[in-house]
Amino acid sequence: KHLTWRPAAMAAVALLICQVQGAQKLGKVPGLDDKTNDYQEQAFNSADKDGDRKLSLNEYKEMLTQAMKSYGSEETLQQRDDKVQELFNKLDKNLDGSIAYDEWQVAVVEGQRKAQEAAAMQAAAQETKLKMVFDAADSNRDEHLDLGELWEGFKAYGYGKEQIDVFFTVGDQDKNGLLNFEEFKVGREGMQKAREMEAMADSLGSEEDQLKAFQDADINQDGSLTLLEYQKAFEDFMAAVAGESSPQAIDSDKIAEMYKGYDTDGSGGVSLEEWKAAVKANMARTQAEREALKTSAQGAI
């Protein structure tokens, strides 16, 4: 593994340490929503151990260490002091040997902007790829897919009849027996959701499976999942479900809300018991949703 500077690194660090209590208000960053502003304030205050409203190199390195530990890369970080210094220097705009809060704000805004640009580029690339798949399946070139074309176009990807039926039923919004491109995208999302439900049911069907999933997610093996550990496990799960296809973009705010549902005592960590209870509740809800989708597909075709 190699240490890389992600555009959203500030948000990731903030999410990791946003449980700190009694943080002083440092001011809002223009152009950021309230939630992101709260994260960046709490992240800065947590890292600022001596309360001087500046981050020293050691304070910055400790902040990165905590973030990288949750991604299982602490050893790599410890071996790359030169890289930490390089990252620190990028934030220390006036080169006074510390990161002042206004310099931190500039970094947060820049990180947010780059993350938004990357997300927009990813969405555009995904749109282009989906249109190519749609056009390849559209054998009569009428800009619509019937069920036969959808089946012929997608069976090669390993999808079964039930999944294709869900794809078509969910996508056929106007119930005319054809999918235009917009409906095609809706149907794909519906099928993806069905696949996620099936994968969750298969991977977490027993207590043994649930325990293994928790242990795999608990990178530092402390018996509790941080938000970043949970997020990484979720990203890995989505990538596994997608297989050779591109995984769907993941909304970090949505993941944070999901995490809160697991962290029932609000401690900032998810214990094994909280994990098992949340999985049990999710499994029951997932089973009900699977049955609803299956009934809808059978009734329409």
Image (cartoon, rainbow, N blue to C red):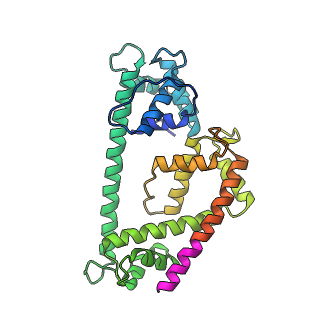
Residue at x 66%, y 57% (from the top left corner): 279
Residue nearer the viewer, 226 or 85: 226
> Position of 281 compared to 68: left or right?
right
Is 76 rendered above or below residue 228? above
Is 184 rendered above or below residue 36? below
| Magenta region | 290-301
**Is residue 5 visible to us here?**
no
* Residue 61, percent from left and from top: 51, 24
Q: Residue furthest left?
A: 142
Residue 246 position by quadrant: bottom left
**Is residue 47 visible to us here?**
yes
Which secondary structure is most common in the magenta stretch? helix
Residue 21 falls within the magenta-colored stretch = no
Residue 295 falls within the magenta-colored stretch = yes
* Residue 242, percent from left and from top: 49, 62
Residue 71 position by quadrant: top right
> Position of 8 compared to 160: left or right?
left
Is 37 rendered above or below residue 25? below
Residue at x 70%, y 54% (from the top left corner): 277
* Residue 297, percent from left and from top: 50, 80
* Residue 167, percent from left and from top: 45, 75
